[in-house]
Amino acid sequence: MDINIENKKEIVQKIYRLLDKYHSGQLGGEAMPEDANPKLEKGSKENYIYFTLPMALNYQRNSYKLWKAALDTYKDKDSKSVFECELTKNMPVEELRGYLIKYKLALQPNKHIEIWKKNSCSIVELWGGDVRDFFELQKYSVANIKGYFANHKKCFPYLGGNKILNYWLYVIEQYTDTKFVDRENISVAPDTHVIQASYKLGIISGDELCDANVQIIVSKRWEDLLKNTELVPIDVHTPLWLWSRNRFSVHI
C-alpha cells in the first residue's frame, strides 16, 4: 500500500490534531504505566536497571499491571534483589522464580524467569553490569545501539526485539538523564495499540493489518510519513497508544 501525496497531507494534519488533543489532556495519560517507579535518581545505575529489566517482559500484557508489579517487587526488601544483575546472575533459579512471581512481575514461571536471568547475565558479562556504560560506549547513538542489538539479539531476549527495543529507548529518554544524539532513529514502537491507530488513520491497509510483518511495515510507514516534518516517529507513540486505548473516542 502506497500513501499518495494528498493522503499524506491529510494524515499529517490529523496527527497534529491528535497531538493537540494529547497535549491538552483530552486523551488522558496523566499517569503512564512507567510512572509506577521508585523515583530513583535519574542518572543512577539503579534507575537505568529499573527501566531496563521489566521491559523484556512487556509483551502481550497490561503495561500498567506490569509496572505496578515491578514497583511492588522493588519495594520489597527481599525481592528487590532481582534488580541487582550481579546478584541475579548467581541466584538459584528457584529463588529467582519466587521473587519474580511474588507480585506477578513474571506471569510465566519458566519463560519469564529465563528471560530475566539471561538479560541480567548479559548486562553483567557484556556491559559490566551498568547500562550507562553501554550507552556511553555506543556514543549515545540510537543507530549504534540498534546495530549492536542486531548482532546480540540472543543475548538480550525480547529486549532486542523491534517493538520493545524502540519503546525501551523512548522510556530511557523519558525517565533517565540520557539524551540520544539521533533520537529521530527511535522508530514508533509498533505494539497492538499503535498498529490499530495506524490502521484507523489509513497508514496501513486491512491486509497489512493481518500481515505477519505488520510491526516492520508500521515502523517503516511512520518513518516515511514524518520525513520532512518537525516530528520524529517516537513523538507520536504515546498519543497513538492513548487514542487506541480509549477506543478512538476522541474525534480528530
Image: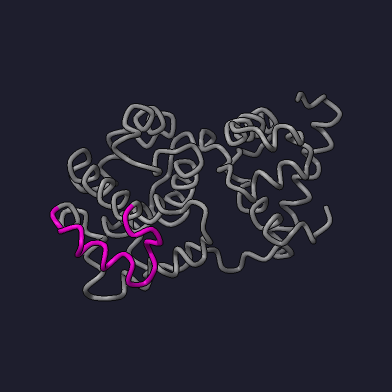
Q: So how many labels did they put on this image?
A: 0
Which of the 4 quarters of the picture holds residue 74?
A: bottom left
Furthest-bottom residue in this view? 76
Taking the spot 21% from the left edge, 65% from the top edge, the residue there is 81
Between 86 and 229, the one lying in front of the other is 86
Give the percent coordinates (x, y) of residue 124.
19, 45
Which of the 4 quarters of the picture holds residue 92?
A: bottom left
Between 75 and 156, the one lying in front of the other is 156
Q: Is residue 132 left or right of residue 68?
A: left
- Magenta stretch containing residue 133, yes or no? no
Taking the spot 63% from the left edge, 30% from the top edge, the residue there is 217
- Magenta stretch, residue numbers: 90-110
Is the N terminus in the top left, top right, bottom left or bottom right quadrant?
top right
Q: Is residue 175 left or right of residue 73?
A: right
Q: Is residue 12 left or right of residue 50?
A: right
The way the protein has been coloured in the rendering is one colour
Taking the spot 41% from the left edge, 32% from the top edge, the residue there is 146
Answer above or below: position of 201 versus 64.
above
Furthest-right residue in this view? 6
Answer above or below: position of 178 versus 102.
above
Answer above or below: position of 213 versus 105.
above
Between 91 and 142, the one lying in front of the other is 91
Give the percent coordinates (x, y) of residue 5.
82, 25
Give the percent coordinates (x, y) of residue 246.
71, 62
- Magenta stretch containing residue 104, yes or no? yes
Give the percent coordinates (x, y) of residue 72.
36, 73
